[in-house]
Image: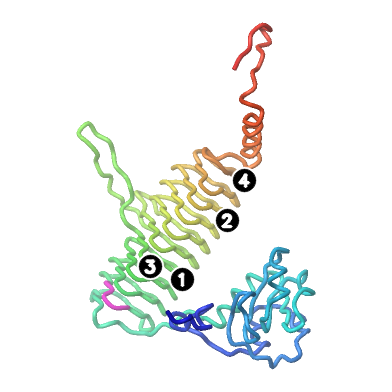
């Protein structure tokens, strides 16, 4: 097999649109760094051609370094033309590289990466193979991909990008700049602006609701909707059930990873983070800025307070107060969890659970 070319390291042009080269001044501006951040540059006329990790970067690349000592060896040896760093790390940038100083290097890096690799532009028009209902309202600036299906009375806003084989159901409304990846389906939903629904996601399907009768299960009609506010991302193959009687709501700015299950009537606040394989049961409320780490499970009809952080594989079976940090199954405060772990390890080290003397009968021991 032929050796991969340099472009395969980051932003392979076969898969990612690339712009540039860009001047150092343009990169500093994109990073929103202070102009003093480039003060060590011999000239703002330096041209940069791409982005790369510290260890693979060339003099034509921009790299970045998190504010952590473990990255110092890679930083001091980098060949990058420019490096985005925190002020604390500026003195460790090699003399051959330009230091671009930012309060948050990762945020600055994301802006610079978007400068070199912007989202693909929308190509207005409806593919000839798409099936579009006569009553659908599609903005002329929207793009409808091959074999997509747009239902009756659906509304597609300006600059939306509907990918191949997407189904947008009857009555669904999409705001501006919505992107829906291939094979996703959206029904019974109202979608805000700048929402990104990744490939294979399922939005608005019937929730898991049934009554138990002597003769078996009786399905309960799910007559609510899904309401997704602005600037939300829904990961690949994630499912968001519509409500039973009230809406399932996802607040503005929330990020939901791949393979997540959001059940009916769940209400998620603003700027929440829900990581892969999480399951949130019906009618639970997540207040603003909640974080659910990977594989966490949340029982139904609970309230998770603002800013709470739930650790990976935690099992939440009761309400969580604001700003709490929980871990374990059943979930409990982090300090309590690790105190219990330390106690168990001490017992194991000492040969088992200590025997406790019953104060009422000094001659007996109680396990």
Pick the front one: 141 or 127: 127
Q: For the point 40% across and 59% down, which residue is it?
A: 238
Binning the other alpha carbons within 10 Å of mark 1 as few (below 14), some (14 to 19) or many (20 upward) gives many
Q: What count of labels does the image hold? A: 4
Question: Which residue, given by chain and number where applicable, does mark 3 sit on?
Answer: 199
Quadrant containing the N terminus is bottom left
* Magenta stretch contains residue 57: no
Disc 2 to disc 3: CB gap under 8 Å? no
Binning the other alpha carbons within 10 Å of mark 4 as few (below 14), some (14 to 19) or many (20 upward) gives some
Q: Secondary structure at mark 3?
A: loop
Give residue 244's position: percent from left, percent from top. Answer: 34, 49
Question: Which residue, given by chain and number where applicable, does mark 2 sit on?
Answer: 289
Mark 4 or mark 2: which comes first in sequence? Answer: 2
Which residue sits furthest front? 1
Region of the chain picked out in magenta, as a range: 145-149
Mark 1 or mark 4: which comes first in sequence? Answer: 1
- Please tell me whether the stretch drawn in magenta is mainly helix, strand or loop: loop
Question: Which residue, given by chain and number where applicable, does mark 4 sit on?
Answer: 324
Pick the front one: 101 or 35: 101
Disc 2 to disc 1: CB gap under 8 Å? no
C-alpha distance separating marks 2 and 1: 20 Å
Q: For the point 58% across and 84% down, which residue is it?
A: 50
Horizontal side of residue 186 vs 63, given as left or right: left
Which residue sits furthest bottom? 45
Foreground: disc 4 or disc 3: 3
Disc 4 to disc 3: CB gap under 8 Å? no
On screen, 332 above or below 224?
above
Foreground: disc 2 or disc 1: 2
Disc 4 to disc 2: CB gap under 8 Å? no
C-alpha distance separating marks 4 and 3: 33 Å
On screen, 268 above or below 348?
below
């Amino acid at each position: 097999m032929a050796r991969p070319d340099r472009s395969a390291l980051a932003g392979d042009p076969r898969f990612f649109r690339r712009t540039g080269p860009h001047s150092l001044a343009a990169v500093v501006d994109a990073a929103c760094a202070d102009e003093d951040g480039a003060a060590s540059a011999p000239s703002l006329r330096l041209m940069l051609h791409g982005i790369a990790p510290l260890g693979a970067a060339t003099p034509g690349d921009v790299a970045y370094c998190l504010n952590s000592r473990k990255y110092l060896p890679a930083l001091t040896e980098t060949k990058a033309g420019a490096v985005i760093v925190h002020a604390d790390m500026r003195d460790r940038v090699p003399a051959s590289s330009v230091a671009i100083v930012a309060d948050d290097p990762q945020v600055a890096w994301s802006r610079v990466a978007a400068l070199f690799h912007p989202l693909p532009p929308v190509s207005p028009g409806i593919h000839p193979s798409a099936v579009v209902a006569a009553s659908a309202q599609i903005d002329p600036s929207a793009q409808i991909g091959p074999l997509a299906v747009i239902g009756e009375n659906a509304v597609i806003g300006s600059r939306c990008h509907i990918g191949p084989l997407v189904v947008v159901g009857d009555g669904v409304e999409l705001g501006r700049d919505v992107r829906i990846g291939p094979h996703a389906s959206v029904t019974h939903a109202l979608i805000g602006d700048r929402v990104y629904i990744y490939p294979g996601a399922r939005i608005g399907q019937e929730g898991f609701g049934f009554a138990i009768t002597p003769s078996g299960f009786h399905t309960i009609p799910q007559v609510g909707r899904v309401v997704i506010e602005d600037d939300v991302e829904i990961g690949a193959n994630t499912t968001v059930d519509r409500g039973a009687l009230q809406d399932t709501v996802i607040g503005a700015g929330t990020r939901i990873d791949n393979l997540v299950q959001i059940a009916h009537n769940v209400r998620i606040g603003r700027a929440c983070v829900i990581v892969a394989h999480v399951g949130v049961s019906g009618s639970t409320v997540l207040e603003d800025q909640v974080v659910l780490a990977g594989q966490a499970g949340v029982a139904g009809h609970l309230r998770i307070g603002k800013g709470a952080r739930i650790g990976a594989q935690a099992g939440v079976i009761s309400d969580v107060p604001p700003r709490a940090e929980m871990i374990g199954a059943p979930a409990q405060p982090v300090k309590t969890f690790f105190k219990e772990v330390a106690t168990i390890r001490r017992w194991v080290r000492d040969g088992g659970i200590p025997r406790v003397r019953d104060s009422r009968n000094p001659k007996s021991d109680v396990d």
